[in-house]
Amino acid sequence: MKIGLLTSGGDCPGLNAVIRGAVLNGIKTYDYEFVGFRDGWRGVVEGDYMDLPRTKVRGLARQGGTILGTSRTNPFDGNGGPENIEIMLEKNGIDAIVAIGGEGTLAGAKRLADAGLPVVGVPKTIDNDLQATDYTFGFDTAVSIATDAMDRIRTTGESHHRCMVAEVMGRHVGWIALHSGMSAGAHAVLIPEQKVSMEQVSQWVKEVHDRGRSPLVVVAEGFIPEGFEEVMHDKGVEKDGRPRLGGIGEYVTHEIERITGIETRNTTLGHIQRGGAPTGFDRVLATRLGMGVVDMIHDKEWGKMVALQGTDIKRVDFSEALDGLKTVPQHRWEEAKVLFGR
Ligand code: F6P
């Protein structure tokens, strides 16, 4: 059996660990061969791939990024589609495709599997917003990078008696903001799932400042304050009304300073959260998912992805994973809120 791996969508610490886990399990347990498609679905559509012998995955668990490269190409674009991909697989003697990616990637994988192709998936996103899996690898790394950054932001904030704002990733959900904010002891956490007015945020900031502390506000890039859509439209935003990456932290900072009079600074963490080596937790999770997906291929269970449920690696249908985004539930927000303000 020859298996083709691809990494697609935004990169994520742990992608290389998945590749290593899959290749080692496949070679050692089943005597399988592996190839890696270059740059996500583009490599599949164009039949562009590299061999992945055991020597190629040596030491990969601790390496950030993806040795295969990634792109946001859709498998149905251009010369794609099930018929052409099937011809490519036959021509190259490839028996199965493993798509390692987030919602968009897995949606493409599902369409191909529905058309009868031997496709399976591994969930990936630092945002942790995929259903049917308790955690995605990359999330723990992002939270720990953001926590470290906030610890640093706080010491300079305290020296200057300033309010500090940290903007973290999370286009549609606030998991990174919630966890890094709790971990760093933030005095307010602003997430896409919860509308909060800038007056309320400013009150939390003032209460903290009044008791002699330097307030720390964490904001997810997808947060839209109450009554904010209008303002963002005026400033020019993307079609769905979502703030541009890097926009909301500046806005929140400006508003806090305007309303409270407290000197405030913003730091947008951006792609630092996605770079570098994965944490130990993410290395283990990614390795287990890579190993699990090969076991699933061995059982010819197509149209599924591997997932972490509790402490076990399970197999779930693509449709289960693609049933809307996993957002931060109300009770998790209420829990965090106890720590805000005074
Ligand atoms: O992987 C998802 C994500 O981390 C989002 O939180 C963020 O908005 C996005 O990636 C940015 O990715 P890129 O700049 O690669 O489009």
Image: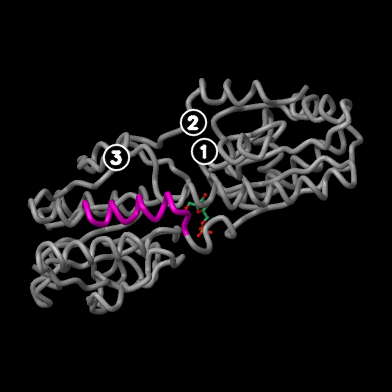
Q: Where residue 286 sits in the image (x, y, percent)? A: 34, 54
Q: Secondary structure at mark 3?
A: helix
Q: Where residue 233 sits in the image (x, y, percent)? A: 66, 43
Q: Where residue 260 sits in the image (x, y, percent)? A: 88, 31
Give the class, few, some or many, for how many residues have Cα within 10 Å of label 2's Cα (few <14, many ≥20): some
Q: Residue at x 58, y 42 (%)?
A: 222
Q: Secondary structure at mark 1?
A: helix
Q: Secondary structure at mark 2?
A: loop
Q: Amino acid at mark 1?
A: Trp
Q: Nearer the viewer, residue 277 or 47?
A: 277
The answer to whether mark 1 and mark 2 are in CB contact below 8 A is yes
Checking the image for residue 175, the label placed there is 1
Highlighted range, magenta: 278-292
Mark 3 — residue? 321
Name the front one of labels 3 and 1: 1
Q: How is the image coloured?
A: one colour
Checking the image for residue 66, the label placed there is none
Give the mark, 3 or 2, whose residue is nearer the N terminus: 3
Mark 2 — residue? 328
Give the mark, 3 or 1, whose residue is nearer the N terminus: 1
Q: Nearer the viewer, residue 24 or 298?
A: 24
Left or right of 190 in this view: 123: left
The answer to whether mark 3 and mark 2 are in CB contact below 8 A is no
Real-space CA distance between mark 3 and mark 2, rounded to the nearest whole angstrom: 16 Å
Query: Can residue 154 be seen from the camera position used here?
Result: yes
Figure quadrant of the N terminus: bottom left
Q: Residue at x 47, y 47 (%)?
A: 139
Q: Quadrant of residue 10?
A: bottom left
